[in-house]
Each structure stands twice: as C-alpha cells, then as structure tokens.
Image: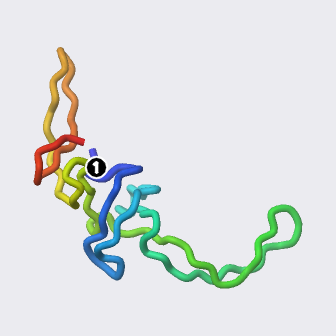
Amino acid sequence: MRRIRKDDQVEVIAGKDAGKAGRVVKIFTDRDRVLVEGVNYVTKHERVQAPGRGAQEGGIIETEAAVHISNVLPVCPSCDEATRVGYVYEVEGDRRSKVRRCKKCDATF
C-alpha cells in the first residue's frame, strides 16, 4: 500500500514548487513519480503534426511534469495540514483492513 494515492490532495515540500498544493492526477509506480495538478510546469517544444485528422499546431507549450514521490506529502482532510502517514488495521467483524492514519491528529483517511 502506498502512502499517496490517485486523487489525494498533496503538498510539494522540495524543489522549485515547494509549498504549492494540488491533486494527484497519475502515479508512475515504476519511476516513483506522481503527476500533480497545477505543479511543476515545464516548457516543451512541440513539432507540427502532419495535416489531416487531429492535426496539432507546433510551438512552445507549457505542460505539467512528474514530481518524485519523496518530494510530496499528503494533506490530511481533517486537520488540513501536510503530514506523514502511518498505518493501522481496522477490524469489522471477521475482516481486517489496513487504512492510512495521520501522524498529527490520528485521523484515518
């Protein structure tokens, strides 16, 4: 189980965008990177595509790039702060489930 999941609210703690927050759009597990909405914009030189169906214009575009997973912290929904994550098992009848727990306020999310 990963400490950061898709659609989690996270805050960047290192790099040029430190202090910014956003929603996780995609997780690249093989590279340990996450794509965060509105964070880490880079300029990209795009070539003009062939004319016809779905033709794209070329030029310099701005796009979001992935951030390493160690440079983001999840934001706890109850205390609304970036926090480290612990795990706790919740028991419901004969089933056990592992849930994430905020290290600051002990709320599960």
- Image quarter where the N terminus lies is top left
Whether 18 is drawn above or below 72: the answer is below
In this view, the residue farthest toward the right is 52
Q: What colour scheme was applied to this rendering of the protein? A: rainbow
Residue on which disc 1 sits? 2
**Which residue occupies the foreground of this view, 77 or 37?**
77
Quadrant location of residue 28?
bottom left
Above or below 39: residue 29 = above
Asked where in the image residue 43 lies, by quadrant, the reply is: bottom right
Q: Is residue 104 left or right of residue 18?
A: left
Q: From this view, report whether residue 31 is shown above or below residue 57.
A: above
Front residue of this view, candidates 96 and 9: 9
Judge left or right: residue 74 versus residue 86.
right
Q: What amino acid type is highlighted by mark number 1?
A: Arg
x 11%, y 49%: residue: 105
- The residue that appears at 25% across and 72% down in the rendered structure is 13
Instruction: Pinpoint residue 16: horizontal percent, then vertical percent.
Output: 35, 82
In the image, residue 103 lies at what x, y percent?
A: 11, 52
Q: Which residue is the extreme one toward the top? A: 93
Residue nearer the viewer, 101 or 54: 101
Mark 1: give few (<14), some (14-19) or many (20+) Cα within 10 Å.
few
Disc 1, SS: loop
Q: Residue at x 31, y 79 (%)?
A: 15
The answer to whether 76 appears left or right of 38 in the picture is: left
In the picture as drawn, the residue positioned furthest to the front comes out as: 79
Residue 66 falls left or right of residue 11: right
Q: Position of residue 46 (x, y in %)?
A: 67, 79
Instruction: Assign the C terminus to one quadrant of the image.
Output: top left
Across and down, in percent, residue 19 comes to 29, 73
Would you place residue 36 above or below residue 90 in this image? below
Number of numbered discs? 1
The residue drawn where x is 25% and y is 61% is 73
